[in-house]
Image (spheres, rainbow, N blue to C red):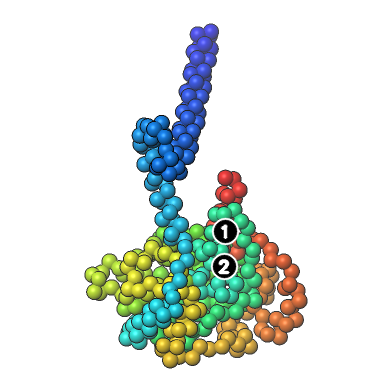
């Protein structure tokens, strides 16, 4: 009994000693990294002989710190917004207009950047949701029920109207609502809690939630989108970082020989992972680029009129059982909007999920933990 007790105590003491040694080693490594980092910040001419000897002794640490600095610099460059000058921007848009007129099948991918002019934040821009979260800042909610289409939205509507943009990849049946249907949906959970009145299957939202990527099959009609991309001879990307869309190779067809790929035009202020494949990268705000494009195409930009918004006639009313299935404010026609305008002047509340999905809440929790 005594031998077993002594053996157990000895094993515990040895484990503690090993853990202590590991902690001391990690602390020693941290101190070494701090010292080398401080020396590398010195100008080469200011380094003493002792400094140079220390750097020579810890070449592995020097190389690792150099790699980290290179990665930070690259990331910073990718996050910087670049603007084409007025003359260059106009020349690029003219090239885009000529290609659009010659194209037989155009596919258009849009991102959150086309809605920033409506005071709806994007994700990875300087003031984007993800950018702010990484800086430990809170993000205020945007009242989607009061947002109106931007100039870019209206330009896309006109391009669709004159049949310059493909519209063949919509789901077979849609239920358009006058409120944000993502209240109960989240990351990888797209059920809204409401049922289709025809087949009684649960209705799903039609967005890619914040944080979703990879081989997501639902809720979007990927088959229809992939078929449209296969036929495309021109792809136009507006206001998207493409960091999620890049995962879906079926939407790009870039595995073809160069002369058989669709021509790729990207409108974005920041770097995207598809820049090196682009026929042309246009550094400009979406509204500015689309305004110039419509001018080149000789098309009038429609003015948004809420009273004529087709959403009020397209929206599917809720059944009696569904009347209390949401708490989000509904999109209102002009008359109803005037009645509630005074109630909407309070301070913006913090985002509680919804159209950001669980990716937002998860990131907030992770940030607090760190």
**300 with respect to 345 (left or right):** left
The crowd level at tag 2 (other Cα within 10 Å; few <14, some 14-19, many 20+) is many
Does residue 320 appear left or right of residue 32 in this picture? right
Image marks 1 and 2: residues in contact by CB distance under 8 Å: yes
| SS type, badge 2 | loop
User: Which picture quadrant has residue 224?
Assistant: bottom left
Tell me which residue sits at (39%, 45%) in the image.
66
Identify the element where label 1 is drawn: helix
Q: Relative to 91, does residue 329 appear above or below in the rendering? A: above
Q: CA distance from mark 1 to mark 2?
A: 10 Å
Q: Which residue is mark 1?
A: 132
- 1 or 2: tag closer to the N-terminus: 2
Name the mark on residue 121: 2
Of 330 and 82, nearer the camera is 82
Please state the horizontal and vertical placement of residue 240, each as a whole percent of the image. Answer: 46, 69
Spot occupied by residue 352 in the image (x, y as percentages of width and height): 64, 60
């Amino acid at each position: 009994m005594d031998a077993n007790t002594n053996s157990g105590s000895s094993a515990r003491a040895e484990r503690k000693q090993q853990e202590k040694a590991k902690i001391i080693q990690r602390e020693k490594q941290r101190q070494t990294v701090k010292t080398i980092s401080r020396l590398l910040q010195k100008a080469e001419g200011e380094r003493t002989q002792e400094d140079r000897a220390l750097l020579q002794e810890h070449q592995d640490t020097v190389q690792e710190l150099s790699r980290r600095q290179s990665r930070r610099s690259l990331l910073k460059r990718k996050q910087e917004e670049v603007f084409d000058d007025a003359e260059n921007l106009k020349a690029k848009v003219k090239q885009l207009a000529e290609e659009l007129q010659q194209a037989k099948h155009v596919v258009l991918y849009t991102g959150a950047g086309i809605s920033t002019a409506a005071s709806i934040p994007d994700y990875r821009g300087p003031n984007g949701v993800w950018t702010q979260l990484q800086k430990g800042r809170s993000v205020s909610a945007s009242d989607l029920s009061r947002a109106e289409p931007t100039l870019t939205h209206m330009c896309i509507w006109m391009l669709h109207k004159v049949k310059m943009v493909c519209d063949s990849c919509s789901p077979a049946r849609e239920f358009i609502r006058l409120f944000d249907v993502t209240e109960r949906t989240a990351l990888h959970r797209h059920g809204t809690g409401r049922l289709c009145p025809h087949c009684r299957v649960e209705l799903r939202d039609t967005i890619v939630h914040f944080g979703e990527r990879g081989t997501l099959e639902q809720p979007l009609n990927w088959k229809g989108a992939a078929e449209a991309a296969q036929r495309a001879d021109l792809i136009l990307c507006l206001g998207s970082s493409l960091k999620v869309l890049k995962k879906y190779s079926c939407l790009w067809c870039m595995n073809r020989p160069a002369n058989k790929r669709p021509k790729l035009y990207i409108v974005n202020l920041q770097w995207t992972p598809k820049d090196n494949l682009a026929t042309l990268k246009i550094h400009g705000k979406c509204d500015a680029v689309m305004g110039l494009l419509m001018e080149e195409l000789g098309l009038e930009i429609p003015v948004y009129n809420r009273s004529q918004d087709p959403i009020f006639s397209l929206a599917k009313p809720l059944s009696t059982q569904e009347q209390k299935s949401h708490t989000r404010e509904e999109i209102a026609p002009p008359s109803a909007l005037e009645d509630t305008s005074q109630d909407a002047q309070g301070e913006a509340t913090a985002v509680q999920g919804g159209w950001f999905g669980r990716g937002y809440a998860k990131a907030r929790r992770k940030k607090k933990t760190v």
